[in-house]
Amino acid sequence: MSAVIAAASAMAPSSSAAADKFLWGAASAAYQVEGSSTADGKGPSVWDDYLDRLHLAGPGVSGAVAIDFYNRDQYLRDIAIFKELGLTSYRFSISWPRIIPDGLGPVNPAAVAHYRQFIKDLKDAGITPMLTLYHWDMPSSLAAAGGWENRDSVKWFQRYADAVFANFHDQVDLFVLINEPSVERATKTLAENIRDHGKGDFKILPDADHMAVSLKTYNHILLAAAAAKKSFDAHGYKGQLGLAVPLFPTITEDGAGDADKKSAVLADGVLNRWFLDAMYKGSYPQDVLDMVSARGLDTGVEPDDAKTIGQAHFDYLGINFYSPMYVRNGANPTDRFAAEQYLPKTVYSAFNGAVRPDQFKALLGRMKSEYGNPPVYITENGAGFAGEDVMKDGKVDDIQRCRYLVIHIAAMKSAMTDGADVRGYHVWSSHDNLEWLSGYASRFGMIYVDWDTQKRTPKLSADLYARIIRGDDVTENDCVARN
Ligand code: GAL
């Protein structure tokens, strides 16, 4: 384990008013937890197609049951656990194909009633709902019409968002419009490679051939979020709206050459500045635009698009942080986008990449120094490590996840001490759940789920998180196996 990790500890929150209002939560997404995939008139989503119909995550892996979270008896038991842990916020997503089963047609009152009840149940337990409108489960009909690659997706989403706001604005103050555009794109590309060629690599950093389409979808997603925000404001609703953007500090290994460093800067442009500059500066990064025009790529970006996105004035920035990304110059030195993501073999890492809380702190500092210190919610942070989520003597001691959370919370608090305006933190995830293309094999939860019985068992990480929420001065050395 590296020195950066060993040195970190989670200080107790200060007693200021801001600290009292700080939201301590956990996150999940509809397709990954709900199950009940045809209940109450739900339409099919692209993920039902990938997993339930095409079995891209392997035979028998589907979202038909997941962790049974659509079932009120079950989710009430889960809310009781959240309450016991002391969570003050819960980030969940609602399913577009439940609310509008065919994507564009009439709103489904049964789905609205379900989520209104769920939100009421959360609030009755004293937990603030953070409602994500879109966490990747696009209605199949719209995916078939090109999904985010089609500029009409801006209108499709705005209509859906209007339906959500009309039905939930009186219950919810915190809305996450769209989750992780770049990771959605990578996951979808991988799914389709598996479907069409039997295999593929997971690459969040698109290679040059896929670059134009990726940038095009990101532009449409940002425009869709901007249109939804404009409409929300025009209705005079009260609430905070933002997107959950996955941010990846792009870093090089010690001893990297100039070409590697240049590639890392361009990768930062594609993965981070493309979103942040549009939202906070009303422009797309010039180095990415230059690369795109030098290659003759068509991203479909129209002259005023970035300005429109900047004028949306999102209320907060949602940051999903798991890991930085190591970047090096790819094999072809004449390619102006020769950036390649990789994971050095010697680096301590979780399922989602290198464990680097120092990079989390630096990222939050960057939001202050380069983007005017917007209010930030950490909408996801978490980890899974192969082999440690094992039930033994009735308990699960997930020591590495526990340490990961403690040291990342410490890094966040240290950035806050330096002035970063962070308002809340959500662990990915409350429970073990359906992890997209790795199915039920990769566990990320603080609460263990027995897939056969649906029995829940809070893990060691949940105990430590509860202590942090209570204000105990916890360090990673407290993450030890329990007797
Ligand atoms: C995020 C995604 C989540 C979850 C998590 C763990 O990228 O938003 O849905 O899958 O990664 O891998």
Image (cartoon, helix red, strand yellow):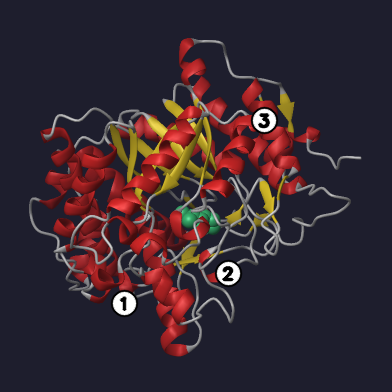
* Residue 170 percent location from the top left of the image: 28, 31
Point out residue 413 in the picture as x, y percentages from the top left corner.
56, 26
Work out which residue is located at the far right of the displayed protein and give it. Answer: 483
Q: In this view, does 62 lie to the left or right of 280?
A: right
Alpha carbon of mark 2 to alpha carbon of mark 3: how far? 28 Å
Asked if residue 212 can be seen in this view, the reply is no
Residue that appears at 81% across and 55% down: 391
**Of marks 1 and 3, the one in the foreground:** 3
| Quarter of the rendering occupied by the C terminus | top right
Q: Do the residues labelled 1 and 3 touch (CB within 8 Å)?
A: no
The residue that mark 3 highlights is 466
Q: Which amino acid does label 1 sit on?
A: Asp
Q: Is mark 1 on a helix, strand or loop?
A: helix
In this view, the residue in front, 320 or 417, is 320
User: Quadrant of residue 271 in the image?
Assistant: bottom left
Q: Residues within 10 Å of mark 2 (few under 14, many from 20)?
A: few
- What kind of residue is marked 3? Ala
The residue to which callout 2 is attached is: 438
Taking the spot 20% from the left edge, 30% from the top edge, the residue there is 237
Query: Residue 474 at x, y = what percent?
Result: 72, 27
In whole angstroms, how far apart are the C-alphas of marks 2 and 1?
26 Å
| Residue that lies at the very extreme toward the left in this rendered image | 303
| Mark 1 lies on residue | 209
Amino acid type, residue under disc 2 in the picture: Ser
